[in-house]
Image (cartoon, grey):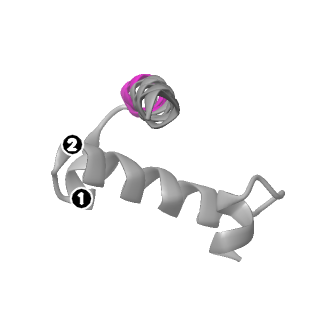
């Protein structure tokens, strides 16, 4: 179920929420309980920033790989 959700398949809200909390707590190195205390708008904004950063990292790794 979680694997399918991570690959973009439709999933239930509980699984999506769990993935969001895990991702943000890992990215910020904070307890999942701290994520639950945040306003939803902040969680969404921080996940957006995290997603953009990870995309840029991936692009830079791909560039470095292609230079070899």
**Farthest residue in the front direction?**
68
**Marks 2/1: CA distance?**
12 Å
Name the residue tied to disc 1: 33
In the picture, residue 26 is in which quadrant? bottom left
Name the residue tied to disc 2: 28
User: In this rendering, would 17 be left or right of 34?
Assistant: right
Q: How many marks?
A: 2
Q: Which mark is residue 58?
A: none
Q: Quadrant of the N terminus?
A: bottom right
Crowdedness near tag 2: few (<14), some (14–19) or many (≥20) residues, C-alpha within 10 Å = few
**Farthest residue in the left direction?**
30
Q: Nearer the viewer, mark 2 or mark 1?
A: 2
Return the residue nearer the eye: 39 or 43.
Answer: 43
**Farthest residue in the right direction?**
10
Residue drawn at 40 percent across, 34 percent down: 43
- Please tell me which of labels 2 and 1 falls first in the chain: 2
Q: Quadrant of the C terminus?
A: top left
Return the residue nearer the eye: 58 or 31.
Answer: 58
Q: Residue 65: horizontal and vertical position, in percent?
A: 46, 37
Would you say residue 50 sits in the magenta stretch? yes
Residue drawn at 66 percent across, 72 percent down: 3
The secondary element bearing badge 1 is classed as: helix
Q: Magenta segment range?
A: 42-51
The secondary element bearing badge 2 is classed as: helix
Q: Residue 62: horizontal and vertical position, in percent?
A: 51, 33
Q: Please name the predominant secondary structure of the magenta segment in the image.
A: helix
């Amino acid at each position: 179920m979680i694997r399918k959700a991570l690959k973009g398949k439709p999933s239930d809200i509980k699984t999506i929420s769990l993935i969001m909390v895990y991702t943000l707590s890992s990215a910020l190195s904070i307890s999942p309980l701290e994520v639950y205390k945040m306003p939803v708008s902040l969680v969404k904004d921080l996940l957006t920033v995290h997603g953009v950063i990870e995309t840029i990292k991936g692009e830079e790794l791909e560039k470095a790989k292609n230079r070899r």
